[in-house]
Image (cartoon, helix red, strand yellow):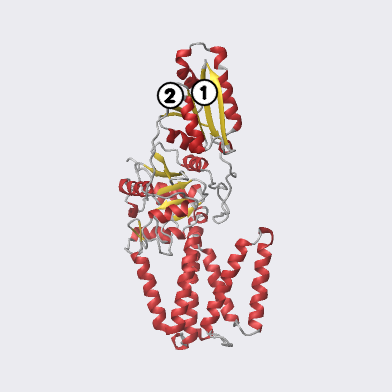
Amino acid sequence: MNKTNNKSPISAKLRDNEAYMKERVGVDASFDLGFREISVLKRNVQLYYSNGLVHSSVVQVLIKELVEINDFESNTKKTPEIVKNRLVHHQFEQVETMDEAVDQMLSGLISIFVDGMKYAFIVDVRNYPGRAPQEPDTERVIRGSRDGYTENIIENAGLTRRRIRDPRLRLEMVRVGERSKTDVCVSYLQDVADDGLVRNIKEKIKGIEVDGMTMADKALEEFIMERKTSPFPLVRYTERPDVAANHIFEGHVQIIVDTSPSTIILPTTFFDHLQHAEEFRQAPVIGTVVRMVRFLAVFASMYLLPLWLLFSLEPTLLPQGLTFIGPTDVGNVPIAIQIILGLIGMEFLRLAAIHTPTAIATSMGLIAAVLIGQIAIDVGLFTPEVILYVSISAVGSYVTPSYELSIANQIVNVILVILTGLFGLIGFMIGFVIHLLILVRLRSLKTPYLWPFIPFNAEGMLYVLFRLPVPYSNKRPSIVHPKNNYRQPLKKS
């Protein structure tokens, strides 16, 4: 892909810069691009900005400050220095190329050109449209903070900085997209995160060549991850600043993409997707119980249906006390086909709930599930047991904290049901082994996906299975190769 790198220098002639802005940027054609020319100490000064991305009242104050220079100053030879001193805003820089000036203007900053000067002043007056921070719908907690990331990268960086007031926290900005110029922020602790990991991530981001990043973080993930066809999520998405901060403390790297309320955590493992903030908002014992129940639900979403189908097809595999598990009435349709139809029906309900207005989504889902399920049983399409186990499997997928992992687990569930229905015990065992081997071979930026289970790490497994009290959770996961292994300073004796 060929990239155009026209590094046009800023001209000392103001009219040349104006012609560039009109021809390349469309200042006189696009209604949302603002342009104002004023006279300061007998020199023309031009201001360029995007109306929808700036704070209008701040722009008005800035123009007023520049105009008032004529009332208090008279040294025309030092006009650029005087203008610079009057720009008292919190973020200010000078650029020497038109490309930089245009990129900053289209990012919500204001570009100021002074006649006779071969550079432009850039002042931060951004005011991105968006919503206020609020609790994410998919990561709710009973107790805990109610703020969440928004579509504004500046606010998101502030929410992270608020929880990590460490001078060693780095928030490095990169622009991606030849046309979109999407802001991407790489966040990490300089004295904790592995240098090779940080360097690898930044190189992958800077090497992206694409017109635009309209799908934001998901498009970025597909560029930087190696296994692009894997259904299993190789990064963790979160909209909670406290979750992201906790991962940064462990030595992970956070990627914030402008226009997206979810941030990316790298690298990640299978068990990272099974953690939830609610476990850490409860007592350690309660958190451990919640975690165990969640693990049970996740594994039920994958293996409950194929196991029940296996026992239905081969009742001799059941112990003497569990012979009641099989269906009492097979019905008119084979059990395997019933399960597949049930899973497809649950997917219909899920998609319908997404596209249905919120006010009627809940009632629509309940009515559809009850009516369709009962009528299907009455006409002989489903047996009651199939409805029961399909429902338990569906609830288990909803219990999974990671939406991406729950979808991948449903795919595994369907494949295991098909293999079990076709080949019985052999099909189930083959499907289970293949599933395990795929997970073992997966890597998230060279990080084993099943760590600490495979390769086995006893200490890491202890942190996975049990929600330990915070004073005892004093070690960072070794799999991210942190520079500092201890999360808490050792007490001096």
In what element is the residue under mark 1? Answer: strand
Q: Give neighbour class at mark 1: few <14, some 14-19, many 20+ (Cα, 10 Å).
A: many
Q: Position of residue 86 (x, y in %)?
A: 51, 20
> Is residue 320 something one can see in this rendering?
no
Q: Relative to 410, does residue 174 appear above or below in the rendering?
A: above
For residue 440, which quarter of the picture? Answer: bottom left
Q: Give neighbour class at mark 2: few <14, some 14-19, many 20+ (Cα, 10 Å).
A: some
Q: Which residue is mark 1?
A: 45
Q: Which residue is mark 2?
A: 12
In what element is the residue under mark 2? Answer: loop
Sequence-first disc among 2 and 1: 2
Q: Relative to 161, does residue 456 appear above or below in the rendering?
A: below
For residue 368, which quarter of the picture? Answer: bottom right
Q: Position of residue 194 (x, y in %)?
A: 32, 47
**C-alpha gap between disc 2 and disc 1:** 12 Å
For residue 62, which quarter of the picture? Answer: top right
Q: Position of residue 367 (x, y in %)?
A: 68, 70
Q: Relative to 475, does residue 386 appear above or below in the rendering?
A: below
Camera-nearest residue between 50 and 478: 50
